[in-house]
Amino acid sequence: MRHVRAASTATLALAIAVAATGCGGGTTSGGSNESPKTLTYWASNQGPSIEADKEILTPELKKFEKETGIKVKLEVVPWADLLNRILAATSSGQGPDVLNIGNTWSASLQATGALLPWDEKNFEAIGGRDRFVDSAVASAGKEGEPPAAVPLYSLAYALYYNKKMFAEAGVEKPPATWDELVAAGKKISKDGKWGLGAEGGNLSNNIHQTFVLGQQHGADFFDQDGKATFTSDGAVAAVKQYVDFMAKDKIIAPGNAEYAQNQSLTDFAKGKTAMVLWQAAASTFAAQGMKPEDWGAAPVPVPAGAPGAGKQTNSMVAGINMAVFKNTKNIDGAKKFVKFMTSDAEQKLLNKTYGSIPPVKAAQADAAFGAPDLKVLRDTLATSAAPLPQVPNESQFETAVGTAVKELWADAAAGRPVTEESVKARLEKAQQTMQQ
């Protein structure tokens, strides 16, 4: 998923309650109720702006209309609004026919019962499940149940670094371990420049980073029964390590405690910050005036050695999935549109444009996805990424723990001590909200 804001616990609970009574999903008054030759589509904001996405997607939707006779009405929805819009649609029955969802929401939205299950029959309608990378499909719903969506764009985290700032500080290569990252960050953090960027006000980014560190500390944040385990030793250590980049190591600017989506990328592009942990960022850097030779990409650091499975995990399985509301009036047209968007040709074009990785195996063979930065993302997805917990209350997890980390960032920025005790207290409070 790309940098989203999770919905409130109350909103999610309402959506699930409504689904339990048999409601949810549907079409807008301007959607396919007008005609079986019309679909409404909520696309997520993947590019530098809403307008950029419209410019990218509109020609492709025209191509689909020419091929099928089906017109697609496009709305690009900002990430900050998307999940709440979806949940409102599941409860009101007034939603689009087809929509993009962050893959970390899959199990939560699956639990509402509003989305079309992608069983074997539905997968066959778009060319078969085996066309897709296994890890991408695994992040599309609860294990053991038909996925709630189809993978569209695959993403992973990388460490992006400013080559000029590294050279000026005498840092010869990108850090491979956290100790090396801290050492490099300390060399750089002076004279108004900082080693590492963060977005303390971005709840989902907080979750993504602390989840990965949690994996490295042996923590999953949930047990096998789906019960929250936010106060485990590993979870506490992971959150403290992340916030300590500011509180203890002093390689993140205090102002980052309040940063929202993409503000850390702006600092990076302006040469204020030398490193940032991010998903596909090439298009954003280009939009802000950076040239490809100005920056490099490397795997996210691990405690020691090289990235891999288990405690060497260095990214969550990020990405965007495509879902269909179950009670659309144009189910056949919706599946045709999903088939079009996940075709080899469209997968190559769209993922190349957005700097993401195709979750369709055949499309990955295109030479464009062998570029150095994309190779880092592709290798990470293949060897060292893990999906966020596929539990029905994952959205509450993003809100609760993301907020706890945000509050700890505020403590660090204000010079208040960040201790194991204070971290555990914040996580205990977050865990209690999951039980309400």
Image (cartoon, rainbow, N blue to C red):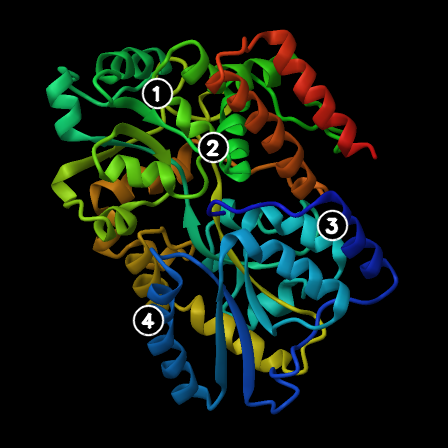
Query: If you read the primary sequence from the N terminus, does the residue marked by circle 1 or circle 3 appear first?
Result: 3
For the residues labelled 1 and 4, say whether their Cβ atoms are less than 8 Å apart: no
List x then y, in percent, for residue 10: 77, 47
Q: Nearer the viewer, residue 64 or 1?
A: 1
Q: Badge 2: how crowded within 10 Å, few (<14), some, or many (20+)?
A: some
Q: Disc 3 versus disc 2: distance between alpha carbons?
A: 25 Å
Of the image marks 2 and 4, the number of the one nearer the N terminus: 4
Height in image: 335 above or below 79?
A: below
Residue nearer the viewer, 56 or 155: 56
Q: Position of residue 106 (x, y in %)?
A: 62, 51
CB of mark 3 within 8 Å of CB of mark 4?
Answer: no
Neighbourhood count class around disc 4 (C-alpha, 10 Å): few under 14, some 14–19, many 20 upward: few
The Cα–Cα distance between marks 3 and 4, rounded to whole angstroms, is: 33 Å
Work out which quarter of the rendered image holds the C terminus and state it.
top right
Local secondary structure at mark 4 = helix
The numbered dot on residue 12 is: 3
Question: Is residue 147 among what the camera can see?
Answer: no
Residue 251 image point, x, y percent: 34, 17
Q: Earlier in the sequence, mark 2 or mark 1?
A: 2
Residue 258's disc number: 2
Marks 1/4: CA–CA distance: 40 Å
Q: Is residue 53 left or right of residue 232?
A: left
The span from disc 1 to disc 3 (Cα, nearest Å) is: 39 Å
Q: Residues within 10 Å of mark 1 (few under 14, many from 20)?
A: some
Quarter of the image holding residue 297? top left
Kind of residue indicated by mark 1: Ala
Left or right? Give the position of 358 relative to 11: left
Circle number at residue 55: 4
Q: Residue at x 41, y 14 (%)?
A: 303
Q: Which mark is residue 306?
A: 1
**Would you call the spot at circle 3 few (<14 residues within 10 Å), some (14-19), or many (20 or more)?**
many
Q: Secondary structure at mark 2?
A: helix
